[in-house]
Amino acid sequence: MDAADFYTGLVAELYHPLKAHSFDAAPYRSFIERWGEPALELGCGDGEPLLDLRAFGLEVDGVDSSADMLERCAREAQERGLEVMLHHQRMEDLTLPRRYRSIFLAGPTLTLLPDDATAGRALDAISRHLHPDGRALVPVSEPAPTPPETIGSVRRSVAPDGSVIRVAVLGARRDEHTRTQVTTLRYEREQDGRTQRLDRDWTLHWYPRDVLTGLVAAAGLTIDEVTGPDGQPASDTETDVQLVLRQR
């Protein structure tokens, strides 16, 4: 499966009620207030934290490769009385009509891209859409190996329509050479005695600091800051970091 097609169909429908964590809008609001508007969220999905940022009155557009997730985002925006500009594009093929002073990814979305070449194209797209005085916030992390005890685990919830929804971990494989981890997930929705079921591979690809630095430089960007999740300067050995990028 193409990586851009993961968050479609049943996966998109069950994403919000089954997700493991939420994105607080506060750090992205601070980033935008520091570097300016307009802003762009890459991989905005169903609108978190994009819609909260719009509710604060910030000029933020969103882009995502999944039409299904964007449809959910647009529906939520309408319910909240918010106007938002959404673009259905892959971040590595980004072609938008203007540049942005603040570009950001909420979480390590770059790891969803399947290889170094695709990540390089995404960074090149960021460079082309970044205002000369702007900055881009790119979180990156190395996923932890899947603990054996999680194989077979199931996360359950009850949807607003009363259906029982589940996601289970069926298996995982990790290749240190290609820096790729694939987790096989089973999504299910049970209602009125009928069950919808979908198995899908969730692929993550990570980047050592030296590889990432090379990709950033090849895209015509330079690293301004490297911080940890707490916002403090990160050491060279930390693998869960946030990069602030600018044009060279």
Image (spheres, grey):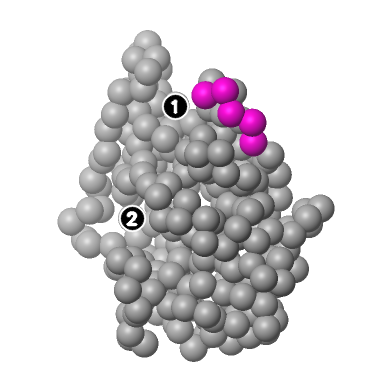
Q: Position of residue 124 (x, y in %)?
A: 70, 72
Find disc 2 in the rendering and name its residue: 171
**Position of residue 83 measured from the top left corner of the image (x, y, whole percent):** 64, 31
Extent of the magenta region: 80-84
Q: Is residue 120 visible?
A: no
- Along the horizontal axis of the image, is 155 left or right of 214? left
Residue 247 drawn above or below residue 60: below
Crowd tier of the residue under label 2, counting other residues whose Cα lies within 10 Å: few below 14, some 14–19, many 20 or above: some
Residue located 51% across and 43% down the image: 53
Task: Specify whether residue 11 is painted magenta.
Answer: no
Query: Decide: marks 1, 2 in contact (CB < 8 A)?
Result: no
Q: Quadrant of the C terminus?
A: bottom right
Q: Secondary structure at mark 2?
A: strand
In the displayed structure image, the side of residue 134 where residue 25 appears, left or right: left
What's the mark number on residue 196?
A: 1
Number of numbered tags placed on the structure image: 2
Element carrying mark 1:
strand
Identify whether 230 is placed above or below 217: above
Dot 1 amino acid type = Gln
- Indicate left or right for 9 with 156 as reference: right
